[in-house]
Image: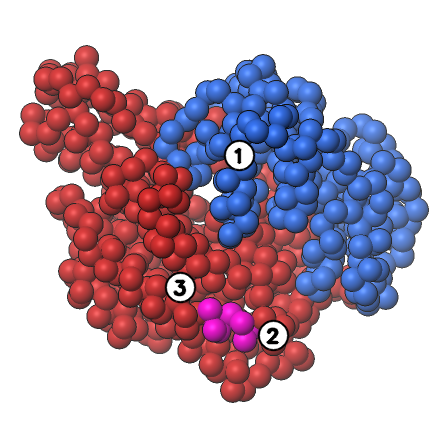
Amino acid sequence: MKKQSKPKVAFFDFSDCEGCQLQFANMGETLLEVMGLVDIVNFREIMSEAGEDYDVAFVEGSITTDNDVKRVKKIREKAKIVVALGACATIGGVNGMKNRAPLEVAKKRVYGDKADTVNTIKTMPVHEVVKVDYFINGCPVYIPEVVSVLKCILLGKPYVVPNYSVCVECKMNENVCRYEKDQECMGPVTRAGCNSWCVNNGNRCYGCRGLVDDPAANGAKDILAKYGLKLNDILNHFTLYNDSQGAKYDQAFK
Amino acid sequence: MTKHSSKIDAKNVKVDVHYLTRVEGHGNIVVDVKDGKLEKCEFQVIESPRFFESMLVGRSIWEAQHITSRICGICACGHSLASVKAGEDALGVTPSEETVMLRKLLLYTEQMDSHILHIYILVAPDLLGVKSIVPLVKTHKPVIEMALRMKRMSDYAGEVLAGRHIHPISYVIGGLTQLPSIDGLEKLYKMMVDCRKDTDETVKLIKKLKFPDFDRPTQYLSLTNDEEYAFYDGDMVVSGKQRTKPHDYRKLLTERVLDYSRAKVATINGKSYAVGALSRFNNNYAKLHKKAKAVAEEIGLKAPCHNPYLNTAAQLVEWVHCLEESIAIMEKISKEGLDEKRIVVSSWPKRGEADKAVYKPNTGISCVEVPRGALFHEYTIDDTGHITSANCVIPTNQNMGNLEDDMRKIVPELLGKKTQDEITLDLEMLARAYDPCISCSTHLLDVKFV
């Protein structure tokens, strides 16, 4: 993208909680700086206008209906750059858990005898439907990483999502390992980039940024079993965010 | 907004609002008037149901908070607290007083966060005659800077207290996974005290806003308790009557699924009802902080108030109440400190304990007041601590029927009296007043005159 021209930016949300868009509102003064560098033409969270002419489309949420598929394809046609924003868009996120039960069962559980009127398909991350140029992982997205990706977009450079585990960042933050505290953690198999956010706050890693390319899932599974987790809970740990990554991982967990 | 202000045919009006709200997806409003008769008035929640109640089945009760927080990015703290309370109810766990105090503090700051977003991002543009906050950055910089400062305070509160505001990290069943840092608390306290001045300025600004006149008494549901203005705990009450324990919520409210909507609609006594700031204000006015009462008086808000447009005013009153209560808690912490032993717990049973843990089949129910109203979580667990069924009753779903009834009353009142643009603005402001969610309400109504 040329330096002089301010790129037109649009935000779109699909099936999700809209928390990742809200992270932009939570940037504070940085938001004002960002607004000086781009033209926001479509952002339902904060504005009434809806521009249809845009260069960069931030797509938040998972694809879960036939209409979503059509809508995201249209967005892809119009945008020069598509950014998948947050866990729901990049890996399916918690919405992927829906895929654990047959769709008919899920519909029945929530809508009872009106289940037939509900339109839903299996949960998919955005790149399963259209090409995605930038991925911003996390549930929610981590603001410093959002800023890094924004810089890359403005400079026309690719952004490389880390392919090492959260443990690397956790060690640099000098956290005591959860396993040392007799607790389990998904850090060893989860993609870094969040600065070990949850472990820094005394919790464990839940795997919201997705698994690293080679997660050594069987080894991780054995360790979780040592910590007293039953097979079902181990599987639940792996599928909390990663269910819609598909058969590739599913097999390793069963 | 549409530019033309041609003569209107008051007998035939068609309102078609796409993407109004975020209740497990997006929503439409459809109003259809033919020959002066209101034929259709529906609030349709369409697309993208998310199936949280199904996703929870088979999950450990210890995971419920992490999962249900993801229902909403704005009320993530409220969902987390409703979830841990329901989990504790199912497991028979009682948190310490200190833990409850920190939870209240988190909940107060979430009300402030959401209310200030609503007041400034939705109402301020109306007040200043623009379509969004974006042009205000240039024309009203001090106001925007003030709004961002107030927002930054409530947001920083989430950071200090829970690791982050959107999907809080450290609030789990039984306590917190980590104490908030002393440095962070000191900084937060200073920011809160500084917010008092910005609050005064905001009151001046809101006083200038002319809210539309409208009056329709309805049933007002909220929590109530004898000790304080209830957010975290208490009994349910309907316009001061029918006091009911949250455990019996199914006896009080009935949920049903509509043909045209993906959200469930709730009723009490067979009729629609309202939840949110105005309901809490009407039911619990006497328990408000004296500064909040003074602000209510200054902006002319009296309990009981039957004008839904004034929900925004009630939010400002609650902002003042929550700010003062938060400052009081922070001063208590500063004086007495926090005892780690009584607060810090693990997010999941530790190695060895998971095997020994004894669970009995049970149902846990909770109710928490989140910014938009009473929120219910209910989980049934089996003898392994896994969820066999779940139910979440969301404030916006509860308000849906009431909004429809308001529209049924207001549309005939406006027909023939107001221009197309004025009707559009009035209906927009009505939807905004309910604050169904910031994402939805900023959407324009597309009013079609046949």
User: For the residues marked 2 and 3, what is the alpha-carbon distance in whole angstroms?
Assistant: 27 Å
Instruction: Look at mark 1 in the image and give the residue it sits on.
Output: A38
Q: Where is residue B103 in the image (x, y as percent from the top left)?
A: 51, 67
At label 1, which amino acid type do we have? Val
Instruction: Look at mark 3 in the image and give the residue it sits on.
Output: B231
Q: Position of residue A197 (x, y in %)?
A: 70, 56
Check the rendered structure and report the hue given to chain B.
red
Instruction: Look at mark 2 in the image and give the residue it sits on.
Output: B183
**A127 horizontally vs B160: left or right:** right
Q: Which residue is drawn at 36% across and 54% down?
A: B142
**A91 horizontally vs B125: left or right:** right
Which quadrant of the structure image shows residue B265?
A: top left
Residue range of the region highlighted in magenta in the rendering: B185-191
Chain in blue on the image:
A
User: For the residues marked 2 and 1, what is the alpha-carbon distance in whole angstroms?
Assistant: 35 Å
User: For the residues marked 1 and 3, what is the alpha-carbon distance in whole angstroms?
Assistant: 40 Å
**B291 horizontally vs B83: left or right:** left
